[in-house]
Amino acid sequence: MFDKLSERLERSFKILKGQGSITEINVAETLKDVRRALLDADVNYKIAKTFTDTVKEKALGQKILTAVKPDQMMVKIVHDELAILMGNSNEEINIKGSPAVILISGLQGSGKTTFTGKLALHLKSKKGKNPIIVAGDVYRPAAINQLQVLGEQIGVPVYTEAGNQDPVQLAKDGIREAKKLGKDLVIIDTAGRLAIDEQMMKEIEAIKKNVNPTETLFVVDSMTGQDAVNTAKEFNDRLDFDGVVLTKLDGDTRGGAALSIRSVVDKPIKFISAGEKMEALELFHPSRMADRILGMGDIVSLVERAQEQFDAEEARKLQQKIAKNTFNFDDFIQQIQQIKKMGNIKELAGMIPGLGKAIKKLDIDDDAFNSIEAMIYSMTPAERATPAIINGSRKKRIAAGSGTSVQELNRLLKQFDDTRKMMKMMQSGSKMGRMMGGLPKR
C-alpha cells in the first residue's frame, strides 16, 4: 500500500540530508520532487501544487532547532500536511435511529457488496448492533447470492424479495422487516453500474429520499486513482453522501484517491478496506495513514487489532501456562489462528516502524503458516499436549500425514522448544524486574 509513493517521498527528503539549514533553494528542490511524487501517485495537479506551496510556506517560516535536522523537520511538516489533506481527524459513522439506516452506494466492481458484509460484522462485533442487510441490487442475482453467503458467514440475516424489480419498494420493505424482527440497524446494498448513468443516479436518489438514511456511504476502489475522485464528486453532487470508503488498499494502490478525495468532495474518509477477510476493515485515521505513507509504520493500529483478537482472560491463562512451562501445541495453534485473524501478514509487519521497508521485497503471504498448521493438526491430542513424547516413529507418521518431511518437523519442534524457553525466560525476567523494582534504593 502506497509503496511507490513512500519510496519517492523518501528520496525527496534525502535532498536535505547533510544540509545545515532550510533555505529557499533546497526547499524548492525538495518540494519539486515531492510534487512529482504526488502526481505520479495520481493526485490531482491543483491539490499537489497547493499542498507543496503550503509546505514551502511553513518550512521557510520554521526556526530549525539545533537538535532537529532540516530533513527531519521537512518530514514532520509534510506528515502534518498529509494528515490535514486527508481530513486531520477520524469521523465516526452515524448509527443512531430506531432502526439506524445505512445506504451503500458506488460503482459495480468497487467492492461495495463485500464492504456491506464487512460493515455489518464490524458494527455487530464492535458496536453491539443487531443488523439486517437488504440486498437492493435487483439486477444482479450474483450480488444477492454473494450477500447471502456473506450474511451466513457473519451471522447476519439478508433480506431479499424474489421477483421484485423495484429497489425503492424493496428498501422500504427491508426496513419494515427490520422493525418486525427487532433489528436496530439496516444496511442497504444498492445496484452499481460499470459507469455513471442517469438511470442509476435517479434510482439511488429515489432510494435515499424514501428511506431517509442516517448515513450514506460512497464506496470507491482506491486502485482507480483520480478516476475514483471524479466519480466521487459526481455521486456527491447528486447524493450529498456522508462519507467515503476506500477499498482494495492491499492492491497496487498509488494513493491518489486517499490523498485527493477529501479536498474534492469535502467529505471524510470513514473506512478503509483491504482483502477479502470479513475482519479486514479499519476506521480511517488521517494521521496514521500519513505515518504509513512516510514509512513510519502504524503501531497504534497494530495494537488495536491485537487487542480485538486477544482476550484478556485467555491471555491470563496463557501467562500461567508459560509460568508453569505447560505451554503446548494446542496453545501455539490458537495463537496462530488469532494472528491470522488480524489481517495480511506482510501488512501487519509493515505496521511495525522500520520493518516495512526491510520486508517490502520479501514474498510473505497468508500461506506462511499452512505447513506448520498441517504438522500440528497431524499430531494426536496427546502429542499436542506433551510434545516431549514425539519420538522417531511418531515423527514419521506426523510428517506423512501433513505432507511434510521429518526434517521440517524437527525444525518446528526445535523452534517450538526454543520459543517456550524464551517465553519462560521473559516471564522470569519480568518477575525479577518487579521484585527489583520493589526493593529500596541504596
Image (spheres, rainbow, N blue to C red):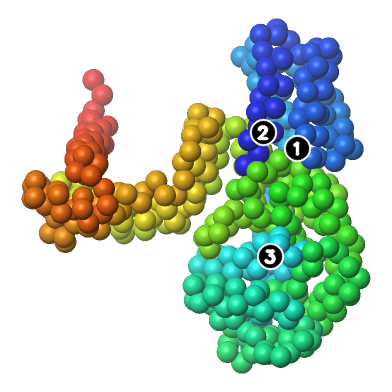
Q: Are marks 2 and 3 in contact (CB under 8 Å)?
A: no
Against 229, residue 112 (above or below) is below
Q: Residue at x 29, y 54 (%)?
A: 374
User: Residue at the location (71% across, 14% down)?
Assistant: 16
Give the residue type that dot 1 points to: Ala
- Residue 79 x %, y %: 69, 33
Q: Residue at x 77, y 86 (%)?
A: 165
Residue 118 location (% of width, % of height)? 58, 65
Position of 230 with respect to 371 (left or right) is: right
Counting residues from the start of the chain, the first of labels 2 and 3 encountered is: 2
Q: Which mark, residue 4?
A: 2
Return the residue at label 3: 112
Residue closest to the eye, 117 or 79: 117
Left or right side of 378 for 291: right
Whether residue 3 is situated above or below residue 175 in the rendered picture: above
User: Contact (CB < 8 A) between labels 2 and 1?
Assistant: yes
Q: Looking at the rendering, in which quadrant would you find the C terminus? A: top left
Q: Which residue is labeled 1 in the image?
A: 41
Discs 3, 1 touching: Cβ within 8 Å: no
